Amino acid sequence: MPPTPCARCHTSRALIIRPKNQEKLCKACFLTVFETEIHETIISNALFQRGERIAIGASGGKDSTVLASVLKTLNERHDYGLELVLLSIDEGIKGYRDDSLETVKRNAVQYDMKLEIVGYGELYGWTMDQVVEQIGKKGNCTYCGVFRRQALDRGAARLGITHVVTGHNADDVAETVLMKVLRGDLPRLSRTTSIVTSSAASDIKRSKPLKYAYEKEIVLYAHHKKLDYFSTECIYSPEAFRGSARTLIKNLERIRPSSILDVVKSGEDMAKLVPPEVTGTSCASAGAVSSADGAEEGAGGCGSANGRGSGGEMAHMEKRLVENEAAEGRETEITLPKSSTVSNGQSKQPSNAQQARPARMPRKLPQQTMRKCTRCGYLSSQDICKACTLLEGLNKNRPKMQVEIGLEDEEGSSTLRRQMEGIALAGA
Amino acid sequence: MTTDSQNAERTMGAAPVRLCKRCQEIEATTIMRTEPLCSNCFVEYIKKKVAKQLEAYRIKNASKNNRRRVLLPISFGVSSLSLLHVLDGHLQSQIRRTNRTGYELHVLHVNTSGVDADAPQIGRLEVLKEKYPRHTYSELTLEDVFDHANEYLETTLRDVNINIGDVAPPSSKHEKLVGLLSALPSPTSRADVVETLRNNLIIAFAKENDCQSITWGDSATRLAEKTISETAKGRGFSLPWQISGGESPYGLHVSHPLRDVLKKELVIFAENVDPPLTPLIHSRPAPTMTSAPAKSTTIDDLMGQYFASIEESFPSIVANVVRTTSKLRAPEVTEGQSRCDLCGLPLADSDASLGEGESSAQSLVQPEGNLCYGCARTTLGSRFTPHS
Ligand SMILES: [Zn+2]
Ligand SMILES: [Zn+2]
Ligand SMILES: [Zn+2]
Ligand SMILES: [Zn+2]
């Protein structure tokens, strides 16, 4: 059988089947089409202005390394006139972060870009290793996520830069869309699907030039360009909703490769259908992790694109929803004998039913107004921002802070995560 | 705090008999969310839950001389049969109380056995007619879509034989349908188009038969499945119309009375009504669970399996998906707004083409005509084009 010719140049031999659409391409054409699509995304969304200084959130992982490489290529090829700078966060995780930071340092030399590293240690007085030592392995990704978002903004501010690009790819966006649907957290869907987000919590604009790039193609691109990246995954597992959504996306991609783009498109359309009175309020009344301070949209590595947390999140939300239902039952089902209405509130489910919790979450949260954190000056929806709240807990030497975002349920969470993993597999 | 049922449990000693929490008399046979219930109380509980959704069908809401006709599509699955059972009881109780009814039921089965070997065979409606005789019954085959398609699909389907006619032009509706489906690129696309055609046929039939309303048997679990499934097919824009109910862009009222009931609860319901509905149910072969989906797996299959697992451990999360999705607001539909040639839904400007980040899609066959994103995706790369 003669070798299949490339579907684009029709001369070279096709060596790559594009994960996005099964097109058979030669290596050169694949690299070109991958770059061209990102260029088209940048142009059609008018992401950059001439003369703009851009900080690339760089973790040393494949996404941000490919992003830096492609932006450098396109900046030269199409004369964008951008000044590109690498911005890295040092969470202070020995073994994981040390090595990836070495990668970023090499990238800075390879791409001839300035590199700025901001450390949790210098910003907060706590490295992640110290946080883990203090609070244990569970739930520390909450800290990591909250700290990271501020750290990127502060690092950018230090550089006098107001635009940070992150390596979020199409798989990440699709995964987050499904996760938000599963979690009933539609109000802030547009944060996930918008290619550019400027948040009330920060003066710094963020964008995701790889929003339509497939993870598999990013890996292929990095491989064929022989890019130097750090491939160890973060040591913590994703929380249950995220893990569940990730498995769904992988299976969908197998069934119909365009699914990733299709979920992104659906997410964009659905974000437009969220009624204004729901935006900024928690309509699910349970489980919606408030992201005004945005723990979930950081760049690469632990806690960000991967939104890590403890595995009990799904079970925790189920419990809250059951309690809400029971509370509503107390109000509406007046026909029931008294004994059953009273016991309604007590879940007979195994474990943690005894934990006292407010019986009912408010149906609607008030509109969030942003102000400066009284401690650190960072924009926040509360008087004290989440980072400072978490820090206060750490500094008081308490094992764990009961703040809104600390959804984890220490007891039994690993069992529940295993349970969820079982589901993810069964659903496969 | 001790409750009566806990007391009951305690006094029974070694082998505790849990009494039903509602009637406090009979042994509980099932646990409804967190409450142990006897089979009677369970059935009543489900009926009440459904009745809450039937506000629009109450007598006082029906005008005297124009009685509402409601179309109930039946697939012979546990959900639509349960809905028929509940609505039949609902109508009987209206008659008992007031000697009149708030609506008339027209039961429709669209037979898909021509293109789906696992679908129920033609003629099963007879059993239902005997069991619930007061309603009108009709059976159509999916092939009838070529005669009953609504105004949007009509032109599309008229042209089909031209476009798929690579051999001899199809001589029958059946050949035409088979030709159309085999021109599609994947099992997911075929299942998607079958569903679209079925919906179109049902809507067209409702209009031809003066039904003002269609009542679907979708359970909460099915609606949650649909939410994620349609999202995955690029049909997120259509979710308010598919999930919320109310006025549909096809000009009919739509309701999902089982929207608060889980699929697994309906299975128990069907077993516990007297006599059980179980023998009437058409069960499809269960899809095999493997770690990676097979080539023949469709997106709907995948979501079906996923939510069957989720509703076991996290039933409230299933209900919450439906509740939140229902809050999405359907966009305004203006008169004369262009419609998708396949599904008939109104098109927004942004729906016109396939997604961003697909510059290379140009090298594939782009579907022609006016298609929404979901229908464009489903027919992309097929030999099926709506217009010649
Ligand atoms: Zn080539
Ligand atoms: Zn602060
Ligand atoms: Zn009872
Ligand atoms: Zn359509």
Image (tube, rainbow, N blue to C red):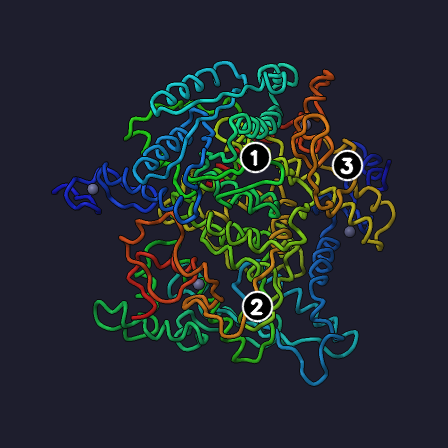
Q: Position of residue B43 (x, y in %)?
A: 70, 56
The picture quadrant where one finds residue A49 is: top left
Measure how far apart labels 1 and 3 are at the Cα level: 48 Å
Label 2 chain ID: B
Q: Are dots 2 and 3 on a single chain? A: yes
Q: Is residue A303 above or below residue B374?
A: above
Label 3: which secondary element = loop
Q: Which residue is mark 3?
A: B16
Residue B379 sits in which quadrant? bottom left
Q: Which mark is residue B248?
A: 2
What kind of residue is marked 3? Pro
Q: Is the Cβ of the residue at disc 2 closer than 8 Å to that at disc 3?
A: no
Q: Chain of mark 1?
A: A
Q: Is residue A315 left or right of residue B199?
A: right
To which residue does mark 1 refer?
A296
Residue drawn at (36%, 36%) of the image: A216
